[in-house]
């Protein structure tokens, strides 16, 4: 098993190995940003409440509500709680259910800490895996918490058109 950059003792790596890790990190960062931009672009074009992220949205939604009944989709996610030992175990059990069902289920991505925020400052996003993103965003979409993004984009289009 090869170690990722955060798991390896960077001091013991050769210069070439460090460069390879840096390249991998850059490639990963590009993928994460592309994912965030694509999702945001979709939310600007259609109401989140009408959006399906996967063919398993209904299953993911029901499973998430069952496993995380106290999750408040309107609230800011408590990252410390999410990443605590108990939080990691709870999430791991949820996520692993989708290993054979969802492509890239454990691929790293970012999720907004609060549905009222755009992807912006680092304090407003949390590093997560794809299934955490899907679960949280499916709930937010079902509850209409992302519809403001579409409404804001539409208002900006109308404002721009009226200034021509």
Image (cartoon, helix red, strand yellow):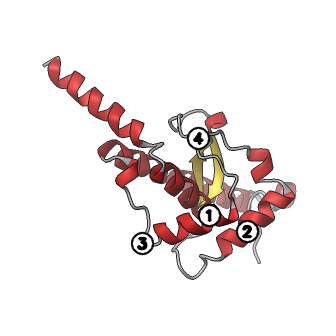
Closer to the camera: disc 2 or disc 4? Answer: 4
Mark found first going from the N terminus, 4 or 1: 1
Check disc 4 and report the residue beneath it.
74
Q: Which mark is residue 64?
A: 1
Tag 2–tag 4 contact (CB < 8 Å): no
Which percent across, then down, holds residue 39?
A: 42, 51
Q: Nearer the viewer, mark 4 or mark 3?
A: 4
Looking at the image, is mark 4 or mark 3 earlier in the sequence? 3
Please tell me the numbered disc located at residue 55: 3
Q: Nearer the viewer, residue 133 or 17?
A: 133
Q: CA distance from mark 2 to mark 4?
A: 23 Å
Task: Give yes or no for contact between labels 4 and 1 (Cβ–Cβ under 8 Å).
Answer: no
Mark 4–mark 3 distance (CA, rounded to whole Å): 24 Å
Check the image and name the residue furthest to the top.
163
Which comes before the other along the chain, label 3 or label 2?
3
Question: Which residue: 75% across, 52% down?
Answer: 82
- Tell me whether circle 4 and circle 3 mark residues in contact (CB < 8 Å): no
* Residue 90 image position (x, y, % from top left): 76, 65
x then y, percent, for residue 115: 54, 40
**Local crowd size for mark 4, using a 10 Å CA cut-off: few (<14), some (14–19), many (≥20):** some
Q: How far is mark 3 from mark 2, CA to CA?
A: 21 Å
Question: Of the residues under marks 2 and 1, which one precedes in the sequence?
Answer: 1
Report the Cα–Cα distance between label 3 and label 1. Answer: 15 Å
Which of the 4 image quarters holds residue 144? top left
Q: Which mark is residue 92?
A: 2
Q: Secondary structure at mark 2?
A: helix
Q: Position of residue 21 (x, y in %)?
A: 68, 59
**Element class at badge 1:** helix
The residue shown at (73%, 72%) is: 93
Check the image and report above or below for 76 versus 135. Answer: above
């Amino acid at each position: 098993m090869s170690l990722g950059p955060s798991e390896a003792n960077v001091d013991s790596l050769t210069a070439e190995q460090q460069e390879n890790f840096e390249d991998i990190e850059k490639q990963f960062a590009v993928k994460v940003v592309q994912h965030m931009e694509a999702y945001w672009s979709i939310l600007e074009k259609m109401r989140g409440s009408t959006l399906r992220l996967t063919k398993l949205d209904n299953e993911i939604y029901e499973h998430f509500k069952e496993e995380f009944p106290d999750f408040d989709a309107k609230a800011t996610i408590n990252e410390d709680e999410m990443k605590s030992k108990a939080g990691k175990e709870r999430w791991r059990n949820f996520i692993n259910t989708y290993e054979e069902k969802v492509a890239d289920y454990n691929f790293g991505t970012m999720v907004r800490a609060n549905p009222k925020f755009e992807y912006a400052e680092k304090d407003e996003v949390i590093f997560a895996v794809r299934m955490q993103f899907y679960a949280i965003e499916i709930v937010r979409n079902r509850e209409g918490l992302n519809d403001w993004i579409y409404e804001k984009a539409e208002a900006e289009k109308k404002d721009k058109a009226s200034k021509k």
